[in-house]
Image: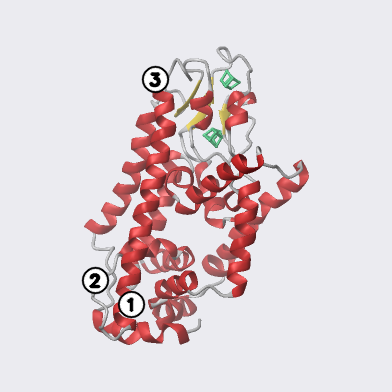
Amino acid sequence: MKDFPYLKNVVAARLIVQWGFLALVLSIGVRFGMFVRHFESSGAAPYVTRPPGVEGFLPIGALASLKQWLVSGEINPVHPAALVIFLTVVGMSLLAKKSFCSWLCPVGTLSEGAWKLGRRIFGRNFRPWGWFDVSLRSVKYLLLIFFVKIILIDMGGEALAEFLGAPYWAVSDVKMLRFLTHPSATTLIVVGVLTALSLLYRNFWCRYLCPYGALLGIVSIMSPLKIRRDKDGCTGCRRCSAACPAGLPVHAQEAVRSPECSGCLNCVAECPERAVLRIAPPFWRRPIAPMTYACLVVLLFAAGIGSGMATGHWQSALTRADYQRLIPLAPFLDH
Ligand code: SF4
Ligand code: SF4
C-alpha cells in the first residue's frame, strides 16, 4: 500500500463518508425530536419542519408501501420518503454492490467502530466455528423470508390499505423515536448484548441478523461491479482475505460473487501488487479507480433521493393539524 497512496485515500474516504453520513442521520434525528417535542408540549417548544429522511428508519413499512405501489401504482403519501429511500438503497445494490452497508448505513458504521474498538481492547476479534458461523449467517435470510412472506406475499389489498391508512402508520416514525428515547428494560438488555457481541465479532449485527442487509446482498449478486483478481499477477500473499471484514477468501477467487461482499474495498487497499485486485464490471479493460467508486456510491444515493424530491414523493401529505392530533396519541396507539 505504501507504493499506492491513492488506495490509502480510499480507506480514509470511506471513513469520512461513513461518519459524515452518521452525523447527517443524527442531525435528522435531533430535528425530528424537536418537531415531535413541539406537538407533545402543546406548542410550548419551538416548531421546526419535519425532516422526511427520518423515514429511512421505517424499512418494514417501506416494504408494505412497495407492495401498494406494485399493486396500485400509487406511492403511499403518508410516508413517501420511506419507499424512496428503500428503492434508492436497493438500486444502489443492483448497480454498485452492497455499498450502502459499508459506506452509508449508520448501523454498519457503528458496528464497524465497535469491532475495531474491540480489537484494540482484546487484541483481536473472534470468529464462530465454521458450521456455527454458517448457521448464524442464515438467521438474517430467515428474517428476510419472514418479512417478505407476511408483507409481500400474505398481505392482501384490504389489509394493506388498512395498515397504510391507520393512525399507527402515520405516527410510526414517532413510535420509532420513542423506542429509542424511552427504551424498555428488554430493549436495553438486547442493545447491551448486541453491543458486547459487536465488540467481539466483526459486524455481528450486519453479518448475522440484519434482514435489510440480507436483501441487499441478494440483489447485489446481479451487480456488474465485482471485486476481480488478476490471478497471473497475484502472489498469493492472502493480505486481501485477512483484510476482508466478511471473512471472504478473496485470494482464491477470480471474482467475488458472494452476497456478503459489501464493496468496502478493504481488500483492494490492502493488496501490495499494482492493479491485481480491483472493483470493475466484466470485460472492462480499465479498472474503476477506487475513488471513482467512492464518488459513484455517494452520487447514486443522492440521485435516488433527488429523484424522489423532484417527483414530489418526499414530503408527507400529513398536515400540521394532523400531527397536532396524532402525536399526543402516539404512546397509546398500537398496531
Ligand atoms: S471482498 Fe473486499 S470489498 Fe468485498 S467485503 Fe471483502 S474486503 Fe470488502
Ligand atoms: S493481496 Fe493481492 S497479491 Fe495478495 S493474495 Fe490478495 S490479490 Fe493476491
Q: Residues within 10 Å of mark 2 (few under 14, many from 20)?
A: some
Q: Which residue is mark 2?
A: 48
Marks 2 and 3, Cα distance to the nearest angstrom? Answer: 49 Å
Q: Nearer the viewer, residue 233 or 40?
A: 40
Question: Is the shortest distance between ligand 1 and the CB of mark 2 under 8 Å?
Answer: no
Q: Residues within 10 Å of mark 1 (few under 14, many from 20)?
A: some
Q: Residue 75, can we see it?
A: no
Q: Quadrant of residue 261?
A: top right
Q: Nearer the viewer, residue 185 or 160?
A: 185
Q: Is residue 152 left or right of residue 194?
A: left
Q: Nearer the viewer, residue 71 or 249?
A: 249
Residue 309 image point, x, y percent: 25, 58
Residue depicted at x 45% and y 52%: 106
Residue depicted at x 62% and y 65%: 190
Marks 1 and 3, Cα distance to the nearest angstrom? Answer: 53 Å
Q: Is residue 235 left or right of residue 334?
A: right
Q: Which residue is mark 3?
A: 286
The amino acid sitting under disc 3 is Arg
Q: Which residue is mark 1?
A: 37
